[in-house]
Image (cartoon, coloured by chain):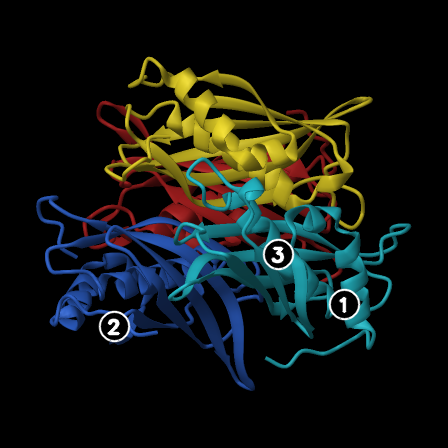
Chain colours: A yellow, B cyan, C blue, D red
Amino acid sequence: MNHVVRDPDFERRVRDSFARQQFMATLGAVLELVRPGEVLIALPFSAALTQQHGFLHAGVVTSVIDSACGYAALSLMEPGTGVMSVEFKVNLLAPAAGNRFVATGRVVKAGRTLSVCHGKLRAVQVDGEVLVAVLQGTMMAVRDRDGVND
Amino acid sequence: MNHVVRDPDFERRVRDSFARQQFMATLGAVLELVRPGEVLIALPFSAALTQQHGFLHAGVVTSVIDSACGYAALSLMEPGTGVMSVEFKVNLLAPAAGNRFVATGRVVKAGRTLSVCHGKLRAVQVDGEVLVAVLQGTMMAVRDRDGVND
Amino acid sequence: MNHVVRDPDFERRVRDSFARQQFMATLGAVLELVRPGEVLIALPFSAALTQQHGFLHAGVVTSVIDSACGYAALSLMEPGTGVMSVEFKVNLLAPAAGNRFVATGRVVKAGRTLSVCHGKLRAVQVDGEVLVAVLQGTMMAVRDRDGVND
Amino acid sequence: MNHVVRDPDFERRVRDSFARQQFMATLGAVLELVRPGEVLIALPFSAALTQQHGFLHAGVVTSVIDSACGYAALSLMEPGTGVMSVEFKVNLLAPAAGNRFVATGRVVKAGRTLSVCHGKLRAVQVDGEVLVAVLQGTMMAVRDRDGVND
């Protein structure tokens, strides 16, 4: 998909904003790649993030895919615009087992106010990759709100 | 709604399982109430859980509602059954601002394998409560898997 | 829930718009009740609306709940505003078997542009009612578009 | 994606089942393509299917994507298995305007009981195609129910 870039400084804006998401640091998540309409976030396994069976909690899975999608949407917004999640839906396909996970967010349709995204999380395991979850959701451009430009 | 209780020891089972969800401890979440088909989880605000604007990250919001719904579903399952999230959809209604948050999970329909739940998160603010998010999702009973009974 | 009514003529506006939804006539759906933030639509069974096992098609179930939610949202919008569905999520709880079905749409949060709704469909059967489906979705107010005021 | 085919006669089974969905005939929908894990359904515009602004009703959009996804899932199930929709989420990206629409359903993960699918609907317009909606949902294999094998 070819997306229109409205902010030539989009990568710096996304990286600065990601650095302000304290929850990403709490999770140990790392911003891997920022392209127009596409963002990748990596997450190493940590026992502190698990549910009762020792897999990553579904909320952790959702968190990194949501951030990847939100920043994929932000990468296409004009300067001075902030991004917030409106809604998302997550299907969990396999237990989040592995040493390392990679979340991808991609913009399906970039609108002036609402952008629709697809996201996913893959688990990197010894013998290959497993698709853990897919997300479909909506991100909103927030304008004219003091201090919100990311 | 009147639910059939299949495990008289359901509250202990839910509380023990919650205690094994290390991610709930990481968030600082506390299991407040366990009733047949209904669970409440409280979460104090912490800067470590925020997104770029200083509100709780949408993934944190989702995490506690998801756990509340999962345990609401588990509370109605027979002994020896585990619970896993199949899918959920979250609508974010207001920024998650406040000192304290309460997530509620309720079973709408308890099936033998799939249970559908409604959840929500309210923010406790100085001047009252605000509804932050609503969730609609599916939880699955997992049987005959070694070591999975919660 | 107490909703603010911005258009005293909301019921007529909803009823006129419903009458223009030709698809509701195709289904045989009838607008039963219009209250601020709440709409009921009734649908008699018809073989023309079935899937392969003789139940109402999930798309039919969705259609009447979606219209109920859309009009519940429209009932709270100011004059000159149109309504469109942004997204919805439907969980199917039981086969849509019965002689008559009632869809309910209710506004959970009415925003200036986006409104979040809960909907459901109940089947009226010989021995009582069965909850067939629940919906959680977002409706959008459309302004300043020629000819769109419903 | 490479899918395992468990029923060599899958295309005939899907086509026979589609022919029994009376609602597809009511809509005027046509089964265009059946491949392992992928189904296309075409729908010509009809005023009988419209909402209040003259576009296809969101429920119609959902109906054909849902059938496409259900049959994509059925195409990978073993003989004697039926398919039912568990849940789906639809994001509406553009008004459903056009003379002809094509719904696609694809299996993302085929499980023994639950299959997760992605679907979409494109509108064929004079000057090209427009992506109208995307769907993410779950289909269930139904076994051991008399008369349900499609």
Question: CB of mark 3 within 8 Å of CB of mark 2?
Answer: no
Q: Are marks 1 and 3 on the same chain?
A: yes
For marks 1 and 3 on the same chain, the one whose residue lies earlier in the sequence: 1
The residue at which mark 1 appears reads as: B77
Which numbered dot is residue C36?
2
Q: CA distance from mark 1 to mark 2?
A: 39 Å
Q: Nearer the viewer, residue A122 or C93?
A: A122
**Chain to which the residue tagged by mark 2 belongs:** C
Q: Are marks 1 and 2 on the same chain?
A: no
Decide: few, some or many residues near mark 3? Use Cα within 10 Å; few <14, some 14-19, many ≥20: many
The residue at which mark 3 appears reads as: B138
Where in the figure is residue B50, as x and y percent of width and height? 51, 41
Where in the figure is residue D132, as x and y percent of width and height? 34, 37
- Is residue B130 placed above or below A49 in the rendered structure? below
Helix, strand or loop for disc 2: loop
The three-letter code of the residue at mark 2 reads Pro
The three-letter code of the residue at mark 1 reads Met
